[in-house]
Image (spheres, rainbow, N blue to C red):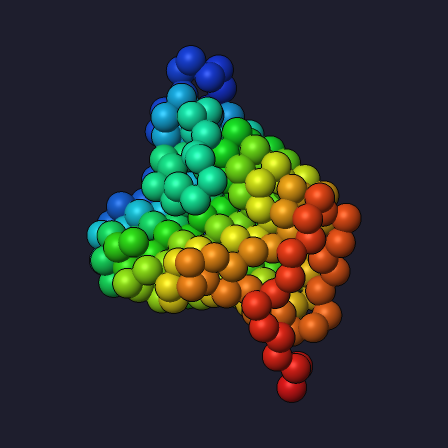
Amino acid sequence: MLRGLSIDGNPPSANSLAGVRFLSGGELIVERSDIGGFANATNGSGINFNPSTSAKLVVRDTTIHNNGSTLAAAPGDAQASGGGIMIRPQSGRADVVLDNVRVVNGPNFGIIADGSGGTIQASIRNSVVSGFTGNGIWAFGGTNAVNVTLDNVSVSGNKQIGLLAQGANAQIRTSDSTITGNATGMQGSGGGAIVSFGDNRNYGNVVNGAPNSSVPKQ
């Protein structure tokens, strides 16, 4: 467990690869911490969760800021090597909980859940993702299922897409969340889907976009 830490990657010329990098083990917990300034030219990240086998990531009450590769990803390039939080299991399944987390400001994406190597089940609640040159929250599927559930999340001021579900088996499910001030609010592409519970606020984007489907709350 990492608790109550300030992890500073500045100055940029001296950055390491990530504030926190997880490659093996059963669980990573980060609480009440500040992680910032990891903006390496090719692969800077606030948290790089890249376990070799099934593992859990829990982040609570934490600010992750000014991180990401300064070699920004082209739209649709999920293999970009740096961002605020990277979730990219090498195999197995990644179970992820982000609660009261602020992921803000960076030259690439905010949060990516990349299922190229394994399955991802992620829950993000009471959180903010804002101020990125790339996408805000990005679910990238394919062979493996990637499910990201949002509850009371603000996604704003990102210069590409606020919520992007890309590729077969990628899904973002969103409830009681605000998506505003992005180039595009939400988009499902290549078989990916945005699913709304009908109580979101998707407005004030250059292009708002729309969910691929809606389901009623029960």
> Considering depth in this image, is 78 or 119 the residue closer to the camera?
78
Q: Quadrant of residue 147?
A: bottom left
Q: Quadrant of the C terminus?
A: bottom right
Residue placed at 53% from the left, 37% from the top?
Answer: 134
Horizontal and vertical percent for residue 66?
55, 30
Whether residue 70 sits left or right of residue 89 in the image: it is: right
Q: Is residue 137 above or below residue 121?
A: above
Horizontal and vertical percent for residue 62?
57, 45
Residue placed at 40% from the left, 21% from the top?
Answer: 41
Horizontal and vertical percent for residue 153?
65, 56
> Considering depth in this image, is 170 or 103 the residue closer to the camera?
170
Whether residue 182 sits left or right of residue 146 in the image: it is: right
Q: Is residue 44 above or below residue 88?
A: above
Residue placed at 75% from the left, 54% from the top?
Answer: 203
Visible in this render: residue 42?
yes
> How many marks on residues?
0
Residue placed at 65% from the left, 56% from the top?
Answer: 209
Horizontal and vertical percent for residue 59?
50, 52
Q: Quadrant of residue 63?
A: top right
Whether residue 125 sits left or right of residue 206 in the image: it is: left
- Farthest residue, direction right: 204
